[in-house]
């Protein structure tokens, strides 16, 4: 029986010839397109699982954003100054527990998609649950920190925008720019922290330290990939219309999370191969690529289970 378009989109078309190592991508950049194309069905279903955890945050953010915008628009600038902290706590402070819940879903997503990138066999529900079970503590902590940073960032941005609207002064424009730069650096560090937590068994403070070290070793490349990974979800937030916000939420719940996690996982694996695996876990260098070992050959030893705390401090020998 001929399968329909939706079936082929989710489950693939199948192969008429035997799979060989020559079919694997040559590099991590090519791996993103390879994995996203050949495992779209699994990524789609992982997205739905992670989306269930993210749904409360998305709905709450949509409702509160509309309420706060309407409330603040009816106030004078001075009244907005006086209400800014209270409204920021209402909108962004209240989101922190829901962001933490969303990160629980990311724990399962990062674990499953990393296995897909490695070419490892995947049992979707079992592996998603295993990822959550192994990583939920650190992902909860990272979710809490992300929620706090999100609150502080939005408060500072809105404060500076209100100030600039009254009188454009260089110091406030500079403060706004520095706040944006700091947020971008923290976002890249978060991506590396999520990738490490889903792969290595390391203490939380070592995780954070290594994430910042890796960020500054590969800042511009990592920044570009990280921004591109979330662009399909964020682009809709730049439109003022409510229906565009709803479309953005639907994109996130259907495929946006899977797209972002796949791209971020490929980025992390590339950087980890250079700064961690090359020294500590050589069998896992280029795993899932044409030039690396197969997954079964690599796990003949042990899967990476702990990060050497000094591993990310080593200089790039390549």
Image: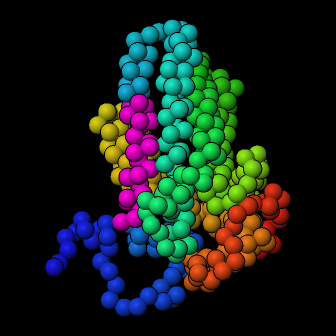
x 48%, y 89%: residue: 20
Position of the C terminus, as image quadrant, is bottom right
State the image coordinates of residue 261 (x, y, percent, origin top left).
Answer: 51, 57
Position of the N terminus, as image quadrant, is bottom left
Q: Quadrant of residue 59?
A: top left
Q: Quadrant of residue 156?
A: top right
Q: Is residue 316 left or right of residue 51?
A: right
Residue 224's place in the image compared with 315, above or below, is above
Range covered by the magenta-colored residues? 41-62
Q: Is residue 285 visible?
A: no
Furthest residue in direction left, as rendered: 1
Q: Front-most of 300 and 254?
A: 300
Q: Is residue 41 visible?
A: yes
State the image coordinates of residue 168 (x, y, percent, origin top left).
Answer: 60, 22
Q: Front-most of 236 and 263?
A: 263
Q: Front-most of 134 and 26?
A: 134
Q: Main secondary structure of the magenta part?
A: helix
State the image coordinates of residue 170 (x, y, percent, origin top left).
Answer: 67, 27
Q: Is residue 158 left or right of residue 42?
A: right
Residue 220's place in the image compared with 42, above or below, is above
Is 53 in the magenta? yes
């Amino acid at each position: 029986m001929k399968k329909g378009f939706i079936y082929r989109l989710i489950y693939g078309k199948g192969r008429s010839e035997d799979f060989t190592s020559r079919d694997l991508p040559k590099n991590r950049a090519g791996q993103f397109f390879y994995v996203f194309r050949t495992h779209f069905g699994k990524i789609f279903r992982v997205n739905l699982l992670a989306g269930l955890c993210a749904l409360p945050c998305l709905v709450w953010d949509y409702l509160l954003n509309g309420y706060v915008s309407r409330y603040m628009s009816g106030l004078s600038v001075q009244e907005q100054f006086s209400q800014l902290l209270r409204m920021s706590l209402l909108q962004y402070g209240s989101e922190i527990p829901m962001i933490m819940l969303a990160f629980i879903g990311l724990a399962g997503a990062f674990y499953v998609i990393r296995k897909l990138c490695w070419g490892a066999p995947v049992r979707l529900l079992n592996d998603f649950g295993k990822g959550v079970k192994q990583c939920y503590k650190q992902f909860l902590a990272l979710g809490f920190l992300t929620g706090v940073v999100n609150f502080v960032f939005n408060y500072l941005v809105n404060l500076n925008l209100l100030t600039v609207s009254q009188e454009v002064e260089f110091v406030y424009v500079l403060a706004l720019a520095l706040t944006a730069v700091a947020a971008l650096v923290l976002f890249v560090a978060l991506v590396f922290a999520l990738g490490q937590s889903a792969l290595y068994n390391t203490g939380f403070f070592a995780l954070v330290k290594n994430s910042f070290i890796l960020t500054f070793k590969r800042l511009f490349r990592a920044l570009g990939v990280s921004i591109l990974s979330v662009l399909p979800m964020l682009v809709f937030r730049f439109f003022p219309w409510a229906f565009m916000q709803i479309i953005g939420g639907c994109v996130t719940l259907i495929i946006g999370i899977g797209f972002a996690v796949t791209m971020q996982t490929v980025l992390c694996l590339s950087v980890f191969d250079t700064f961690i695996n090359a020294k500590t876990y050589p069998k896992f260098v280029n795993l899932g690529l044409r030039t690396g070992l197969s997954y079964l050959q690599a796990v003949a030893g042990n899967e990476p289970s702990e990060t050497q705390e000094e591993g990310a401090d080593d200089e790039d020998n390549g």
